[in-house]
């Protein structure tokens, strides 16, 4: 996924089934918005991915980055623990759940 300047913002390699591919594209779009510091658009994109593709491999990462996007907008750190609890409940053992586990301690 390239941004409007042609700079790479996200890469997915290898074959993905159609729903996983669409989720990966949505993740790339939201990450590009995040890199451009458009935190409102990135959070909206991540939340849309979570709603439409909750069963995909992209969903836990989207939950993580949606929370970070929201934090970048309002600096409300209280959003991190609920995010970590959601990941732990829905995606135990996932890499993004492990990354968020700091907020459970």
Image (cartoon, helix red, strand yellow):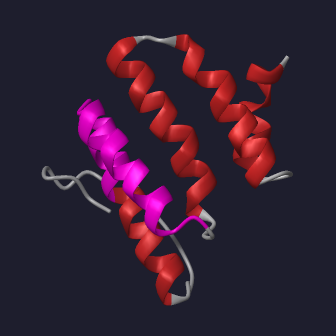
Q: Is residue 47 magenta?
A: yes
Q: Residue furthest left?
A: 4
Quarter containing the N terminus: bottom left
- Image location (x, y in percent) of residue 96: 69, 45
Residue at the location (33% across, 38% down)? Answer: 34
Tell me if residue 100 comes above or below residue 48 in the rendering.
above
**Magenta stretch secondary structure, dominant:** helix
Tell me if residue 92 comes above or below residue 82 in the rendering.
below
Between 26 and 81, the residue placed more toward the observer is 81
- Image location (x, y in percent) of residue 57: 63, 66
Quadrant for residue 38, please give it.
top left
- Image location (x, y in percent) of residue 37: 26, 29
Tell me if residue 77 comes above or below residue 44 in the rendering.
above
- Image location (x, y in percent) of residue 53: 51, 69
| 13 on left or right of 72 | right
Quadrant for residue 44, please give it.
top left
Residue at the location (55% across, 84% down)? Answer: 16
Which residues are the magenta region?
A: 29-54
Tell me if residue 94 comes above or below residue 100 in the rendering.
below
Between 7 and 22, the residue placed more toward the observer is 22
Residue at the location (19% across, 56% down)? Answer: 6
User: Would you say residue 20 is visible in this rendering?
Assistant: yes
User: Would you say residue 9 is visible in this rendering?
Assistant: no
């Amino acid at each position: 996924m390239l941004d409007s300047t042609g700079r790479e913002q996200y890469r997915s390699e290898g074959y993905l089934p159609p729903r996983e591919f669409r989720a990966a594209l949505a993740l790339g779009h939201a990450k590009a918005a995040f890199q451009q510091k458009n935190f409102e658009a990135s959070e909206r994109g991540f939340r849309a991915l979570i709603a439409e593709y909750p069963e995909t491999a992209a969903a836990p990462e989207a939950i993580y980055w949606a929370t970070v996007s929201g934090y970048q907008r309002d600096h409300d750190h209280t959003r991190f623990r609920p995010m970590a609890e959601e990941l732990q409940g829905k995606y135990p053992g996932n890499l993004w759940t492990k990354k968020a586990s700091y907020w459970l301690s």
